[in-house]
Image: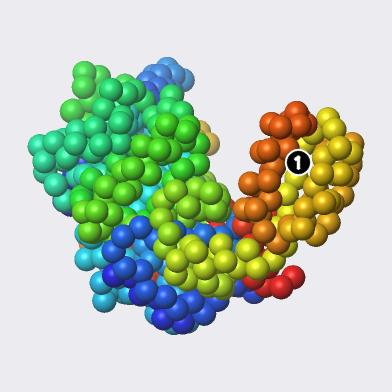
Amino acid sequence: MITLENASRWYGQVIGLNDVTCKIEPGVTALLGMNGAGKSTMLRLITGQMKPTTGEVLVDGLAPFANPEVYKKLGYCPEIDNFYEHRTGRQFVQMMGRFAGYDAKEAASRTEQMLVLVGMADRADKKIAGYSKGMRQRIKLAQAMIHDPAIILLDEPLNGLDPMGRRDYINLLHYLAQQGKTILVSSHILFEVEQMTSSILLLHRGRLLATGHLRVIRELIDKHPHKVRLETTEPRKWAERIIAMPFVLSVKMDRGGLELQTREPNSFYDALEPIAVGEGLPITGFSSPDNNLESIFHYLVNE
Amino acid sequence: MTSYVFTNAFMEYFRMKRLFVWILVAIGMYLAAHAYLRVAGSDSPGDSYSMLSSLLLFRLLPLASAIFSSAVLSQEIEQKTIVYLLTRPIPRPQFLITRTLASSLVVVIMIGLSTLALSAAVYGGFGLKNPYLWHDMVAIVVGALAYGTLFVLVSLIVNRAMIVCLLFAFAWETSVPSMGGSIYLLSISSYLTAIAQRPSIDTSTGGGPLSAIANALGTNTLPADTGWAVMIGLILICGGVGAWWFKNNEYLPREDAE
């Protein structure tokens, strides 16, 4: 289990993490926050790369900074995309296995298992310099898992993965969680997080804004008028139909479509289809500007 | 695990790309020695070797140490690969000392190669008849460790340490040993010269200004015992302080802090 007790971290005059208290239990937990929210700082504190300025960070009851006992049970997949480019993926993972304390034979055997698990067995003998972003992500995951750690920390692991790769990666996380591992995944994309887990830690400007079930966040969103943007070649006709709907609060037209606010997004979405299909009104695009983290934080901090 | 950390670091530093440069340096050393012998034919082999060794080998040693010491930690920080190494179950002091030893060994091999080339040029054959060869080899081993631990300590404390180390290697180590009074005692090179115990060059029989410079750089009145005591002390202090510092301070990939 990972415990943070009033943990803060300052970078000179700038605060990276501000008085965070939380516990992270086995299973997948998402660390959600915009860029600069303090996600990487929190991961660096947990991985013992940094010390908290005040407060305490414990991994299974041990302070992680430069503590080999902690590193035996912790696997870390950093956000950075840097490697020993002249090495092959296999050599790199095997090297990490040797650093974890395995002899050459055991490290080679574990490397093979990990490469199969992350889907890189057939490409692992090429030099890392020639790897795509997705292949690099997989190799990073393999090196993090080589010593079968009980705790796995993944910093923005889905960056650069194609849809198939993301699906495989998320399935792998679920599999690992079923094995009883504690997995902490950082991300700034709500949609990504929803596919991985419903347990979240929400960071904003270094502070922990919310913890618990993702439903809490959803409910917070739904308390506010929900913005929807409709791209269409017939904005005037659509506006006539939409403004008549009782759950629509406002409609704003522009050249490419219209933007509206509704208190009942689900009812609104249900009402769209009959109009589009029955009356033949075109929709060329559809988006919800509210369905991103920035809007959520906007609501949460009442800005 | 320590043996793997050592082997891994050694193989990393001893890659063909790097080795190739130092083979070229050794060949350059051989050719430079031949060229010098043609010009100053009257010098005894001992004087010629002593002069070339002071002028070239013991200038090259801190330079090689500065380059390879940066690979111990600074390079990993610059390349951001430090994060993989510091999240492994290896005690930090053990990690640092082992990698410093590996880099020092590479320096000894590279400079040893140049020493042999120089000796071969002056004494012919493989240069093994050179009576000062083994003294110089011992001084090179001690020097590689002394410069190595000092430069690693600097790289732990100072950002962009390579510039500081190169300045030390070129400016400090070249000028300080020839300074008057007892200021020469502040140079590692002075103690290495004491350990090597090369003779003073007889400038009355020729050799010109090069011999005078070499004398200024390469000889002093320090006894070998003092050289040994100071160098061992320096290695232990720099190594110990470095290990302690590394254990208690944060090392993050450069330009990566939020």
Q: Is residue B205 above or below residue A55?
A: above
Front residue of B172/B33: it is B172
Quadrant (top left/top right/bottom left/bottom right) for the C terminus of chain B: bottom right
Residue B232 in the image: state x and y as whole percent. Answer: 25, 62
Instruction: Tell me the SS state at disc 1.
Output: strand
Residue at the extreme front: A278
Image point (62%, 57%), residue name: A293
Q: Position of residue A87 (x, y in %)?
A: 33, 30
Asked if residue B87 shows in the view, the reply is no
Q: Amino acid at mark 1?
A: Leu
Identify the colour scheme used.
rainbow
Residue beneath the point at 17% across and 40% down: A110
Instruction: Relative to B11, say whether A182 is above or below.
Output: below
On the image, the x and y values in percent for residue A222 come to 63, 63
Q: Which residue is mark 1?
A: A230
Q: Vertically, is B51 above or below B190?
A: above
* Residue ID at (16%, 35%): A108
Q: Quadrant of residue B75?
A: top left
* Residue B71 or residue A231, whichever sits in front: A231
> Image point 41% across, 34% down: which residue?
A165
Residue A179 appears in the rendering: yes
Q: Nearer the viewer, residue A212 or A102?
A: A212
**Mark 1 Cα shell of 10 Å, populated few (<14), some (14-19), many (≥20):** many
Task: Name the side, left or right, on which A103 lies relative to B165.
Answer: left
Q: What chain does mark 1 sit on?
A: A
Answer with left or right where residue A58 lies relative to residue A281. left
Q: Nearer the viewer, residue B43 or B25?
A: B25
In the rendered picture of this protein, how many numbered marks are placed on residues?
1
